[in-house]
Image: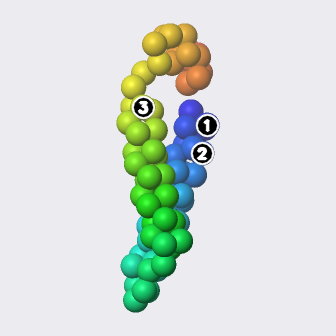
Amino acid sequence: MPYILEHLTSLRQEITDLRNMNARSAAKSADSQIDQSAVEMRANRLVEIKRELSQMLNRPEDPAVWWEKGGRRSRIA
């Protein structure tokens, strides 16, 4: 579970950074080909992140992976 939380935090930060860079780029009056290419690359990365997040919602096919990662807590009576 900690891995998932760290990964989600990392993706959230990356999304924020990409959006901020796109906003700064949009605020410029003239876009060069390099600027436009950078905007497209950031947009593509946002699509990749979206895909990755949707895949994270799916349970792994192997149930052992799903349950072992979370760790079972033993109940103390």
> Colour scheme in the image?
rainbow
Rendered image: mark on residue 3: 1
Circle 2 crowding by C-alpha within 10 Å: few under 14, some 14–19, many from 20: few
Which residue position holds label 3? 55
Who comes first in sequence, dot 3 or dot 1?
1
Extreme front residue here?
A: 33
Which residue position holds label 2? 6
For residue 76, say whether it is visible: no
Q: Looking at the rendering, in which quadrant would you find the C terminus?
A: top right
> Mark 1 and 2 residues: CB-CB less than 8 Å, in contact?
yes
| Residue at image location 47% in from the left, 18% down from the top | 60
* Kind of residue indicated by mark 1: Tyr
For residue 56, say whether it is visible: yes
Q: Position of residue 61 (x, y in %)?
A: 46, 13
Q: Where is residue 47 in the image (x, y as percent from the top left)?
A: 40, 48
Circle 1 crowding by C-alpha within 10 Å: few under 14, some 14–19, many from 20: few
Instruction: Give SS at disc 1.
Output: helix
Who comes first in sequence, dot 3 or dot 2?
2
| 41 is higher (above) or lower (below) than 20 | above
Instruction: Give SS at disc 3.
Output: helix
